[in-house]
Amino acid sequence: MTIFTSRRRGYAAALWALTYGALGVGWALGAPGYPWGATDSDPDGALSILAGTSPGFGWAIAACCLVTAITALALTRGSGRRTPFFAAWAIAALLVLVIPDSRLMMGVAYTPLLLVAPAFGWGLGGATLADAWPWPVLNQLVCVLGGLLLAAAALAYRRDEERGRWFTPERGRVAVYVAVAVPLVYCTTRWAWALGIPLGVSAEFLAEGEGGVWLAGAYLATFGALGGLLTLGLTQRWGVIFPRWIPGLRGRRVPPLLAVVPAGFVSIIITVAGLTYIRWTVAGRFALAEWGAWLPECFWPIWGAALATATISYHLRRRHDGPQESAVRPHHTDHSIRS
């Protein structure tokens, strides 16, 4: 079964690589849609590490995709060799954490607001879903998909028992607390700005954001705080058994993927956004006196790593759930659930 799963995931990753490589060839030959450089909506080329490239870079993309496809196919052989395993993880990290930028998180965060805005008559400055998800940002999702496919193939290729020993319930609990605490620094600054309090910034900086900008920031802060509360479910009983106040689902087991998929994706996008701010900080784009505008975001990779750790620990714990887990005895205290 493990070999079959590894082959299926490896073939999927190889197919993605060959398809994306074909796009790279097309861009190099003049096809429209190159997602970086002059055609990108990045205003000053400061977001993406590929902002300075031109369509001719498509040849390099094609070559990298060919290497990716060969690596993915090597994972289908099930030989247990280390080379394709580590190569797959290196490429996956590049696709998931390095190529995307903070716009990916912004698109995810603003999508719910843009969907409900028409019902309440909110103009939002005329912003639409197309503004939140232009092709260069959608392309980042495509790259993340390729990285995740390759990572999944690598996981199936070589099951490492030490992985399960490291991601213990105890570490999972600590990671949850970190994932809840870290975003609160960011939340505090944005809530303060919405209230007119120049926390971590000058009064002049705060005045520049009048007209609803800081309300949008407060929305993002609240979005992050609610996400932190949901993170608690990775170690609490209600993350395994639906609570009583949910009609139709009370007492039923929570499908593990219902928590793992969104938590895993969020851990990626906040890490990517944090790395973008760290790059800007290293490049000297921020003033120390305006620390509230950038310092909280620099801690986001810690938030992302903690959330990923908590998610993996939750996944491993739920993987060993019995079919008759305490959903059939919700009034009992199950120590395995709380651990």
Image (tube, grey):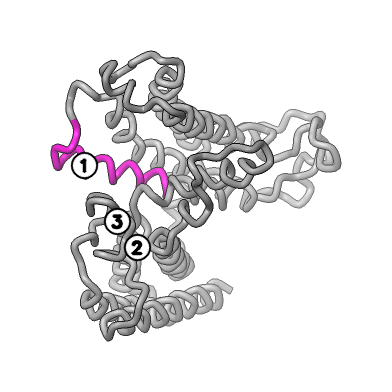
| Residue 271 located within the stretch drawn in magenta | yes
What residue is shown at x 39% (from left), y 42% (from top)? Answer: 305
What is the CA distance from the residue labelled 2 to the residue labelled 1?
A: 20 Å
Mark 2: which secondary structure? helix
Q: Please tell me whether residue 281 belongs to the stretch shown in magenta.
A: yes
The residue lying at 40 percent from left, 20 percent from top is: 193
Question: In terms of secondary structure, where does tag 1 sit?
Answer: helix
* Amino acid bearing label 1: Trp
Does the CB distance between marks 2 and 3 fall below 8 Å? yes
CA gap, disc 1 to disc 3? 14 Å
Q: Main secondary structure of the magenta part?
A: helix
Residue beneath disc 3: 98
Q: Element at badge 3?
A: helix
The amino acid type, in three-letter code, at marker 3 is Val
Q: Residue at x 42, y 38 (%)?
A: 306
Amino acid type of the residue that numbered disc 2 sits on in the rendered structure: Leu
Magenta-highlighted residues: 269-286
State the residue position of label 1: 280
Residue designated by label 2:
95
Density class for disc 2 (Cα within 10 Å; few <14, some 14-19, many ≥20) is many
From the viewer's side, name the closer residue of 323 and 297: 297
Q: Nearer the viewer, residue 119 or 188?
A: 119
Going from the N terminus, do you reach mark 2 or mark 1 first?
2
Q: 258 above or below 297?
A: below
Name the mark nearer the viewer: 1 or 3: 1
Residue at the top extreme of this rendering: 197
